[in-house]
Each structure stands twice: as structure tokens, then as C-alpha cells.
Image (spheres, helix red, strand yellow):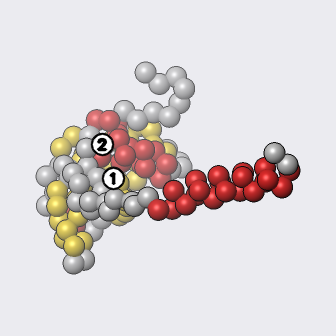
Amino acid sequence: MSQPAENWFLTAVVAGMLAACASSEDKPVEANLLPTNYKQEILDTLSRTIGYPTNVREAYISDPALGPVGKDQRYMACVRYNARDANNHYEGSTDRIAYFYGGHLNQLIKASKEQCGNAAYKPFPELEKLCLATKCE
């Protein structure tokens, strides 16, 4: 093949591949899938957002349950913990609410008493055992 023909052929192949990708229909996301890996997703997020995520005390979590979010219903779970500050002092109990979309954590924000005041908490030992050092057991 000559150089212009090879360039045309290569361009046609790449264009065909891109057209195939663009024409594939994405399946709509089911908003209210039950989150199955919610504890690990919350742990991953807290390990990045708590200033000092090791030696957390009094950690509790609720099971995901459907609740009102604006005009919609979404799975949500509440988390309570007592983490240390930069001076190695415990800050006191903190409540956060986790919102899920499509079975995955979407937001983890501070919770009001109205949001998590009546949550059915259970112990969350995975958060208390969280360790980011290389020598953790």
C-alpha cells in the first residue's frame, strides 16, 4: 500500500472503533441498590478524611436503610466515632451520614441529630482497628 492509502485505512479503522464505542448504550444506574461493601467504602473514605485515623475509639455504624433525601429515597447509614486531633487528644463523638447511589458510597458528611439521632448503631471494630502503618497486624 502507498503511504496515503495506509493513512486513510488507519484513520478509517480508528474512526470505526470510536463510533462503536460511542454507539454503545450505557445501562441506566439503579439508584437504590443495596450497598453490599458499605463498611469498606466508609473505611476507605474515613482513612482519607480523618486527620489521624488510627486509634479511633467508640466506633459505631448502622446498617444501610432507605430514607428520604429531598424528594427521593436513598440508602443511607450513620457512623459515630471518637478520633484524635493533631495534639493526640480525642475530639469527642462525631456523627456522619453516608449516602449511597447505585450501591456505592456517594457522600459521607457530618450528620445532624435529626438524621442520625435514632439510628440503630452497632459496634464498628473495623474502624477502631484501622491502621495505615506498614507494621500493622
What quarter of the picture does the C terminus occupy? top left
Residue designated by label 1: 104
Q: Is residue 107 above or below residue 55?
A: below
* Drawn side of residue 27 relative to residue 72, left or right: right
Front one among 73 and 123: 73
Which residue corresponds to the image point at 28% horizontal and 35% vertical from the top-left? 125
* Drawn side of residue 89 relative to residue 40, left or right: right
Residue 50 x %, y % = 46, 50
- Contact check, label 2 and label 1, Cβ < 8 Å: yes
Front one among 31 and 39: 31
**SS of the residue under disc 1:** strand
Marks 2 and 1, the one that precedes in the sequence: 2
In the current view of this chain or complex, which residue is farthest to the right? 3
Residue 30 x %, y % = 26, 60
Q: Tell me the number on the disc at residue 37.
A: 2
Residue 127 x %, y % = 35, 40
Q: Amino acid at mark 1?
A: His
Could you give the CA–CA distance between mark 2 and mark 1, rounded to whole angstroms? 8 Å
| Residue 78 lies in quadrant | bottom left
Which residue corresponds to the image point at 42% horizontal and 49% vertical from the top-left? 46
